[in-house]
Image (cartoon, rainbow, N blue to C red):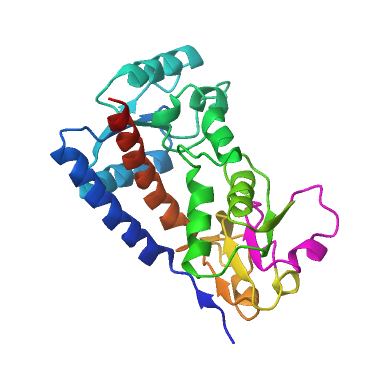
Amino acid sequence: MAAQIIDGNVLAKRVQADVRGRVRALREAGRPVRLAALLVTRAPAGEIYAQRQAASCRELGIDYDLIKLPDESRFAEIAGEIDRLNEDPSVTGIMVHLPLPGGVEPTDVQHRIATVKDVEGVSPANIGYVIYGREVIVPCTALAAMELVRSTGYRLEGAEAVVVGASAIAGRPAALLLTQAGATVTVCHKMTRDLKSHTRRADVLVVAAGVPNLIAADHVREGAVVIDVGINRVTTLDGKTRTIGDVNFEDVQHKAAYLSPVPGGVGPMTVAVLLQNVVRSAELIAKRA
């Protein structure tokens, strides 16, 4: 039997509907909801993503400011802009589009953002709050993966969960969230020996390694919930490029009970969760006012 496909687009629309209502409530109370996004390098993909982000914000009633800095900007200039936005009471959320100019470390820039305005959830404080189970703003990708798991209705208490990939914004936070939900969690990474021996035990398998088609059917337990976080651009034999995940979809769909596709799974949910974090930031700021 083929796996039931987890439609991230459908789930994202539900999140967006919730965000729209919460934004309306804040507006009626006279509270701002404004996302400021910094764009430094003029990579075409970054420009396109920023335009789409602006459209998504407008649709939900969120004010959006795209702040473009010169390509040659150094850390001091970027940090100064973030400091200004941290102090601006009309700005309730801040994010930084990547990549940044050579020599500027993304984490140094992202960690400059005030905890409550860090809508991507990548600051040390927000990661720390996840560890202690007192989330302020949760990393978007990890939270999106968790929402896809929850949408299946699978009971996580006592479940065996395996996360493949240990990045600071996806794998490790996802492992923490699964642990808090009551699962017994194993984290695999590039140093892991005999990956299959771990993944075959998983009731829930979250793959965020950034390796195209890393996971095949023989990695997967029969009836598992498989969440594919990977987004990889590959060139096919005919010279065309396409986006695929870390999971071999065609292979695994005949083994898993639930499977998220790429594209159309974690991707749209991550965008929706970012906007959900924007309104959460605004709500937290309003409570502190």
Residue at the spot 58% in from the left edge and 46% down from the top edge:
170
Magenta: main secondary structure equals: loop
Residue 210 within the magenta-colored segment of the rendering: yes
Residue at the spot 69% in from the left edge and 55% down from the top edge:
164
Could you tell whether 12 is left or right of 238 in the image? left
| Coordinates of residue 199 in the picture (x, y in percent) | 74, 64
Query: Which residue is nearer to you in this view: 93 or 65?
Result: 93
| Coordinates of residue 233 in the picture (x, y in percent) | 55, 55
Residue 87 within the magenta-colored segment of the rendering: no
Could you tell whether 184 is left or right of 231 in the image? right
Q: Magenta residues, as a range?
A: 188-215
Of the 4 image quadrants, the one containing the C terminus is top left
Query: Which residue is nearer to you in this view: 105 or 47?
Result: 105
| Coordinates of residue 116 in the picture (x, y in percent) | 41, 30
Of the 4 image quadrants, the one containing the N terminus is bottom right
Residue at the spot 50% in from the left edge and 63% down from the top edge:
150
